[in-house]
Structure formats: structure tokens, C-alpha cells
Image (cartoon, helix red, strand yellow):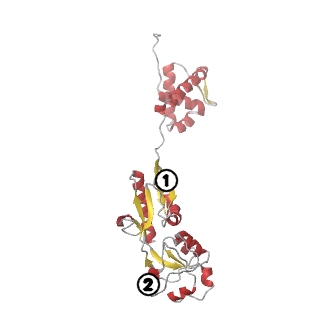
Amino acid sequence: MSDRPIRLPSLDALLAFDAVARAGSFEAAAAELALSASAVAKRVAGLEERLDRALFLRQATKGLSLTPAGHEYLPQVRQALALLQAMPLHQRAGPRRELLRVTSTPTFARQLLVPALPGFTASHPQVELELTLSVPLLDEGDAGADLEIRHGAVPDDIAADAVLLRDRLTPLAAPALLARHPALRAPADLLALPLLRTPLQPWAPWLRAAGLPDVPEPEAGPRFVDLGLTLAAALAGQGVALARLSLARHELAEGRLVQPFALAVPAERHYGLVRHRASPAAEAFAEWLHEHCRAVETA
């Protein structure tokens, strides 16, 4: 080994030298390094003092330019910096993303969840959300889901504290359908129109509240095993849907569906959130979703 003393410069000085050589001025290098121009100049001057060599020519009219010593030193510095940057321990890992798998009934996902998701992802960028759909009537969920948005009875299918929405039901129809029939003045007038049917939501609760307890469930027309399909049929003017106000709020606000009567009755089945696996991401999503549903209920 040589007996010459080793004169190692500081890493900050080397970074300042590289930045100034690349940017061409102390000011531009300072912006890149988030320092003041004077701080960058002092680091370069300290490096030159340690090396006992001038690395830049400082000219009032032409600015900074590398000296011959600077030209020789620069590739060596960049090679050393590249070696340091390539070391795994020096590479800062990006924020760890946590996968959260959520399964939901189709209509809740389309009408209530997906439109509001940007609010959740913006406040929880570390959560990678994977959303799948389930089929309520067939009891086909996703066994691998962390959280399940379920449509069912309380307390049989959903715990009382897990209920997301306590919804209200009312008949809804497209304006074009209503225009083809005499004006609806009393609930009994609905019987002259096609009533859309789904096993997920019988008409009986609303008919009882409207004073028509003896009217049977509709027997004609398609049977939709999905609340969203029932809404789609109503939007197409195929009949009157007994719909949840939360699911149809956008269509009502836009005038694509009309509520002929003010009477709305509480739904007998509710949407609830079932936790299958606990995690920080699951807790964050559950808190956000409950808050979102409360806002929908009070809107």
C-alpha cells in the first residue's frame, strides 16, 4: 500500500460537483439539489480545496466551464456515484402496497361503490383494491375476499352493526312509460302498468303500505335476478320497478326515472359489510365505506 495520505471528499461535495458540471451553473444545480446556490458553491470550493485543484473556470461572461482537471475528474466521480447508487442498500424502496380484495353485489358496486372509489384511492394510495362481483340469490361470493358487501336479512345474514344502508323502497318508472298511460292518481292505478319483478325485492311491502294488501305479486314479464337489471328495464320503459332510492338517486336526479308516489317503505333486506380477514387496509376501507353510505342515506 502507498504511504500517501488518502484525501476522500464528502459525498455531498461530489454530488454538488456532478450537478454543477451537468447543469452549468450553481443556480441550476441548487434547484436540482434543493439547496441554495451559495451552499452548492461552498461545497464545490471545499472539494477543490481538498483536491488542491480548480475544477471549474469561473468567468463573468461565460459562466462556469470545466478545467482540464475537472474534465479528468468528472467521469471518475460519476463512476463512483453510479457504483454507490447501484448498491441495494442505497436504493430506497417505494411505499409498500397492500392488496385488499373486496367482493360486492353487482348493483351496489355499479351504483354506489365504483362512482365513489376515487375518494378512497386518493386518501389511501398504499391500498391496491381488487373488486369482484358476487351473485346474491345464488350465494356465490368470492371465498378469497377480505371484505364482502352482502345483501341480506338482519341478523341472519348480516350483523346489525355491519349494516351499510337501511334503504327505502318506492315505485320508479321512465317518463316515456308514464306518458303512454293515464295519469297515476292513486296507488291502485299502478296495476294498469306492467310491474317489473325480481325475487330480490317482492312488491308486497309497498303494496301493503299503499292499502293494497290483497294484490298478488306480478306474474307476467321477465324475472330479473339482479336489482340493476330491474333498474335497467325500468329505464328502458319496460315497466315500473320497486326500487331502492339509494341505487336510483342519479337516475332520479337526472329525470331518467320518476317517482310517481311519495310513499316509500323500509326495505326488509339490507346491504352490509362482512369482514373475512382483518388488516389495516380492510379497516380503512370499512370506515370509508360506512361514512360514504351514511352520506348517501342523508342526501
* Residue toward you, 292 or 168: 168
Q: Is residue 24 visible?
A: no
Disc 1, SS: strand
Can you tell which of label 2 and label 1 is closer to the viewer? 2
The answer to which image quadrant residue 151 occupies is bottom left
Give the label on residue 229, or none: none
Q: Which residue matches tag 1?
A: 129
**Pointer 2 with pointer 1, Cβ within 8 A:** no
Q: Position of residue 218 (x, y in %)?
A: 53, 81
> Mark 2 or 1 closer to N-term?
1
Residue sitting at x 48%, y 41%:
94
Compared to residue 30, the image places residue 125 above or below, namely below
Residue 150 visible in this rendered orientation of the protein: yes
Q: Amino acid at mark 2?
A: Arg
**Residue nearest the observer in this picture, 43 or 234:** 234
Amino acid type of disc 1?
Leu
User: Horizontal placement of 5 versus 21: left or right?
Assistant: left
Could you give the CA–CA distance between mark 2 and mark 1, rounded to whole angstroms?
Answer: 42 Å
- Using a 10 Å C-alpha cutoff, classify the residue at mark 2 as few (fewer than 14 neighbours), some (14 to 19) or many (20 or more): few
Q: Is residue 61 above or below residue 129?
A: above
Pointer 2 residue: 208
Looking at the picture, how far across and down is residue 249, in whole percent? 52, 72
Q: How many marks?
A: 2
Residue shown at 55% from the left, 33% from the top: 26
Q: Is residue 289 left or right of residue 178?
A: left
Viewer-nearest residue: 122 or 48? 122
Q: Is residue 128 above or below residue 205?
A: above
* Residue 12 screen position, x and y as percent: 48, 30
Residue drawn at the location 54% of the way across and 28% of the way down: 82
